[in-house]
Amino acid sequence: MTRAAVHPVAGQGGGATLPRHVAIIMDGNGRWAKARFLPRLAGHKRGAEAVRATVKAAAEMGIEALTLYAFSSENWRRPADEISDLMGLLRHYLGQELDALHGNGIRLRIIGEYHRFGPDLVKMLDEAMARTAPNTGMTLAIALNYGAQDEIVRAVRSIVADGVAPEAIDMEAIEQRLDTNGLPPLDLLIRTSGERRLSNFLLWQAAYAELLFVDTLWPDFGAEALAEAVADFGRRERRYGGL
Ligand code: FPP
């Protein structure tokens, strides 16, 4: 059976095919700052502005879900001051943007093991998710302390903990236990800054996603770059293993 038969496929928006679920590996903040002789934090700040512009544009286009890789489980290897800068930015972004997200009907979702962050940030995230849960617009999923292999391990643990019989384990049983459960299938995965790796992001979900690697550094990404990416997606032919 093809995946297209299992899941509804990318929708039609204004005549062109619109991806239902777009994910982005936001890369290149550090290089953006370095090229301007600025501290890395300046790059992350501009990166947060790019997040704002991209979220707004995605919602306006009618994309159903946007998943952003904000902090990977490997990012703990960065210097402590950069980690706390990133957490500070996230807190600032949420504090500043939550009303606007909510006002635009956007539902916030956090994927990954975010409970490893400080209790105040966890509380803030939980409250933001609870407040926006009834919204019916785009879902904005932010990946925090996320690693796809870890996500799959957690799903397998949950299957075992639930006592599922081996013959009852199917793709559905796994998908239901992934952090992305309930989101539309991933159609388009974008990585900025010229790197061509998945870096442990949405490995299961990317099975049939179109991959797009762009040279743009994340702080330079925004509405225009997203529109180009979506147009590129619309030109691709997806066969899901068929002819
Ligand atoms: C990659 O650039 C970017 C990150 C590791 C963090 C992304 C975080 C933000 C955009 C800020 C806040 C997040 C939200 C959701 C508001 P890099 O540091 O790896 O760049 P480099 O590869 O050029 O060094």
Image (tube, rainbow, N blue to C red):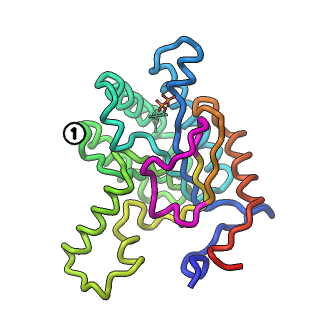
Secondary element at image label 1? helix
* Image position of 133 with respect to 86: above or below: below
Give neighbour class at mark 1: few <14, some 14-19, many 20+ (Cα, 10 Å).
few
What main secondary structure does the magenta stretch of the protein show? loop
Is the shortest distance between ligand 1 and the CB of mark 1 under 8 Å?
A: no
Quarter where residue 117 is shown: top left
Give the magenta-colored segment's residue range: 191-209
Residue at 42%, 36% in the rendered image: 94
Q: Is residue 109 above or below residue 75?
A: below
Q: Is residue 195 magenta?
A: yes
On the rendered structure, is 102 left or right of 72?
right
Q: Quadrant of the N terminus?
A: bottom right
Q: Position of residue 119 (x, y in %)?
A: 21, 39
Residue type (three-letter) at the residue carrying disc 1: Pro
In-image side of 128 versus 141 (left or right): left
Image x and y of residue 242, in percent: 67, 79
- Residue 209 percent across, percent down from the top left: 58, 61
185, 223: nearer the viewer: 185
Question: In the rendered picture of this protein, how many numbered marks are placed on residues?
Answer: 1
Quadrant assignment, res 33: top right
In the drawing, does residue 210 fall left or right of residue 125?
right
Q: Residue at x 48, y 36 (%)?
A: 97
Tell which of 27 and 243 is nearer to you. 243
User: Where does label 1 land, which residue?
Assistant: 119
Residue at coordinates 31% horizontally, 33% vertically from top-left?
77
Displayed quadrant of residue 16: bottom right
Residue 71, horizontal then vertical, whole percent: 39, 40
Q: Is residue 41 above or below residue 217?
A: above
Which quadrant of the figure contains the C terminus? bottom right
The answer to whether residue 159 is magenta is: no
